Image (cartoon, helix red, strand yellow):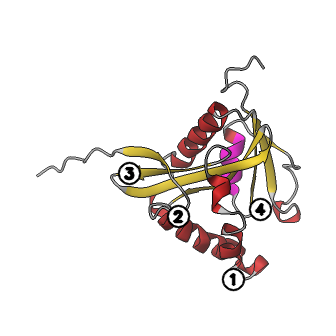
Amino acid sequence: MQLEATPSTLTVLELPMHDPRVRPLLDELAVEYDTRYGDLFGRGAAEEELNRYPAEEFEAPGGALLIIQENGESVAGGAYRRYDAETAEFKRIWTHSAHRRRGLARRVLGELERLAAERGYRGVYLTTGPRQPEAKYLYLNTGYTARFDLAADPETIGPLAFTKDLSVLAGDPA
């Protein structure tokens, strides 16, 4: 007997932070932050970090929170808030651990870039932690410019900052 694969349906949704479909991703992200950085910042620091900004900052018109659902399950997401008049700050780009290595973070990044450009942003600023090499390489492989010494030990840098010009996405003649 041969089993046929059920086709997967990916849906991108823009939601408010308090929507229950967002919670599973943020809960797992908090665990991941505590696992990677607990010895550096202390257990529970992840929850503080995840609540650093008011939820309203991630709502239109200045911000957005996107999730990708697969067959009704939240599998990846990310958000942005206003950094300055022309720059969006991307935050919390995350793929659920059971759904990694499928290009979902890259898809979230592309959707966030597209939406930010449509809403008038000309650039992106973001940071990732020094213990998240997969995020560092995602940004380097998708056209972001590192604003730190790539040869330095990430542990000596702190947050790893990146920028990207969105004017091409917005249709501006760069």
Residue under pointer 3: 70
Helix, strand or loop at disc 1? loop
- Amino acid type at circle 2 is His
If you read the primary sequence from the N terminus, does the residue marked by circle 3 or circle 4 appear first? 3
Mark nearer the N terminus (2 vs 1): 2
Per the model, the C-alpha gap separating discs 3 and 4 is 30 Å
Q: Secondary structure at mark 3?
A: strand
Q: Secondary structure at mark 4?
A: loop
Q: Where does the image place residue 98, in percent across and percent down from the top left? A: 45, 62
Q: Is residue 22 above or below residue 31?
A: above
**Separation of residues labelled 1 and 4 (CA atoms):** 17 Å
Which comes sooner in the sequence, label 2 or label 4?
2
**What residue is pinned by disc 1?**
43
Q: Is residue 70 visible?
A: yes
Horizontal and vertical percent position of residue 100: 50, 55
Q: Nearer the viewer, mark 3 or mark 2?
A: 2
Q: Residues within 10 Å of mark 3 (few under 14, many from 20)?
A: some
Q: Amino acid at mark 1?
A: Arg
